[in-house]
Amino acid sequence: SQTIHQWPATLVQPVGSPLSLECTVEGTSNPNLYWYRQAAGRGLQLLFYSVGIGQISSEVPQNLSASRPQDRQFILSSKKLLLSDSGFYLCAWSEVILLNTEAFFGQGTRLTVV
Amino acid sequence: GENVEQHPSTLSVQEGDSAVIKCTYSDSASNYFPWYKQELGKRPQLIIDIRSNVGEKKDQRIAVTLNKTAKHFSLHITETQPEDSAVYFCAAGRKSGGYNKLIFGAGTRLAVHP
């Protein structure tokens, strides 16, 4: 069966520090991978998606970047965090072959920038 | 651009009552409409979904209806229980540039009071 792992679960970082959140998927090949951000009391905003290794697309301009160095690994990064980067970050995956399949979410990372 | 409007943002009901959450979407190419439930501090999880060739789908106490002409879909929960308390997200999805694109609503915080 497929599983998705995301870490760390919580993170407190000072303004201006770098960020690296990691997500890995097991049990599937060539998945679509996503990073979402959920601000407090808000919906899920799509930040990045990837259809393959090295292929990253951004939905919104921002202070963050993403990379996919391996088929089932997706990394969210920042060189210098801003206060506005605080939020709940969720990695997700979906099947490529089937149309309109559900997105499976990781357990999320609660990032607080202080 | 593409967006999904979700109402209400908060909903409070008594145990045993019904709850209805409504969403409208703007992208006429959307053909997949999932609903996710997110308990406090946890990942969103799919509870039901509907595709554009179906007008209604039911699974025990939850049902979803879709009106493609009006670009409108709804979640209905009957005989609500305290464990139904959570944030519910609707989404509208389609294939876009080789990936499954999901646009989420802002969420509805449902509180079921005993």
Image (cartoon, coloured by chain):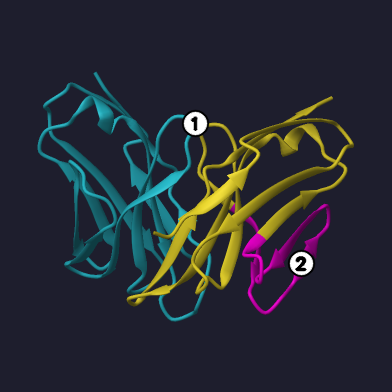
Chain colours: A cyan, B yellow
- Residue B7's spot in the image, x, y percent? 64, 43
- Quarter location, residue B80: top right
Task: Look at the image and say whether residue B67 sits in the magenta stretch.
Answer: yes
- Answer above or below: position of B11 versus A28: above
Q: Residue at x 17, y 41 (%)?
A: A63
- Quarter location, residue A53: bottom left
Same chain for the residues under marks 2 and 1 in the image: no
- Answer above or below: position of B99 versus A13: below
- Quarter location, residue A49: bottom left
Q: Which residues are magenta?
A: B46-72
- Residue B44's spot in the image, x, y percent? 53, 47
Give the Cα separation between the discs numbered 2 and 1.
28 Å
- Residue A7's spot in the image, x, y percent? 32, 41
**Furthest-front residue in view?**
B70
Task: Look at the image and say whether residue A9 sits in the magenta stretch.
Answer: no
Identity, as a three-letter code, of the amino acid under mark 1: Gly
Q: Residues within 10 Å of mark 2 (few under 14, many from 20)?
A: some
For the stretch drawn in magenta, what is the main secondary structure? Answer: strand
Q: Residues within 10 Å of mark 1 (few under 14, many from 20)?
A: few
Q: Quadrant of the C terminus of chain A?
A: top left
Q: Chain of mark 2?
A: B
Q: Secondary structure at mark 2?
A: strand
Q: Secondary structure at mark 1?
A: loop
Residue A41, label in figure: 1
- Answer above or below: position of A18 versus A52: above
Q: Chain of mark 1?
A: A
- Residue B105's spot in the image, x, y percent? 53, 49
Residue under label 2, please give it.
Answer: B57
Identity, as a three-letter code, of the amino acid under mark 2: Lys
